Image (spheres, grey):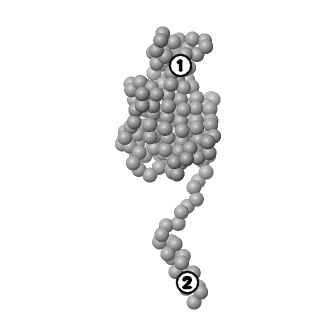
Amino acid sequence: MSVRFSGLVLGPIAALALAGCQETTTTAARPRVDAPGVPVSVQSISGAPDQVTAHFAGLLGEAAAERKMEIVPGDKPARFRVRGYLTAQPTEDGQTALAFVWDVYDESKKRAQRVQGESLGKRGGGGDPWAGIDQTIVAKAASESADAIASFLTTAPVPEAKPDAKSKTRTAQADTEKKR
């Protein structure tokens, strides 16, 4: 199942987008990191039932705001765009794991980073692994997701500034005047 959010819903919901390098980061008790000033847009969250996805998206938005992440609607310019995937699966010891994967894409639509991790839930719920995922586990996964994405954003290389057309024209005019 895939749920797509419009830009206006995603703006307040979450801040995430990764690109280019093809690196993978797995979460492991990472410290909370603030990542102000990097516009990101959450493009999609898929894999979970609609109710879990909606709850996760809201918690992810709160966690992103706590980390000062700049979330922008999907139709607005963003330095990174993020796509998330959630799965629930039984563990060998009978618990249920909520696994998450975030692909972060840059402005040129190249994957810059893949972030992944999991949060353990209560004992399995029979044949449906989602039955073993409670609100506490969803909240933990959203918080860990925000930490992982913020960590990437704080270390992501800053793109080179592109001169605008006016500055190019002024530079060309200055060069012409120097030659006179």
Residue at the image point whose x is 63% and y is 29% from the top = 28
The residue carrying mark 1 is: 89
Give the SS element for disc 1. Answer: strand
**Residue that lies at the very extreme toward the top in this rendered image:** 126
Check residue 176 in the rendering and tell me which mark sits there, or answer none.
Answer: 2
- Residue 66, position as x, y percentages in the image: 49, 37
- Observer-nearest of 4 and 133: 4
Query: What is the spatial separation of the Cα atoms under label 2 and label 1, in whole angstroms?
Result: 67 Å
Q: Residue at x 45, y 44 (%)?
A: 41
**Residue 79 percent across, percent down from the top left:** 50, 50
Q: In what element is the residue under mark 2?
A: helix
The answer to whether residue 171 is seen in the rendering is yes
Q: Are marks 2 and 1 in contact (CB under 8 Å)?
A: no
Residue type pointed to by label 2: Thr
- The image quadrant that residue 29 belongs to is top right
Looking at this rendering, what residue extends furthest in the bottom direction? Answer: 180
In the image, is 135 to the left or to the right of 30? left
Q: Position of residue 158 (x, y in %)?
A: 59, 53
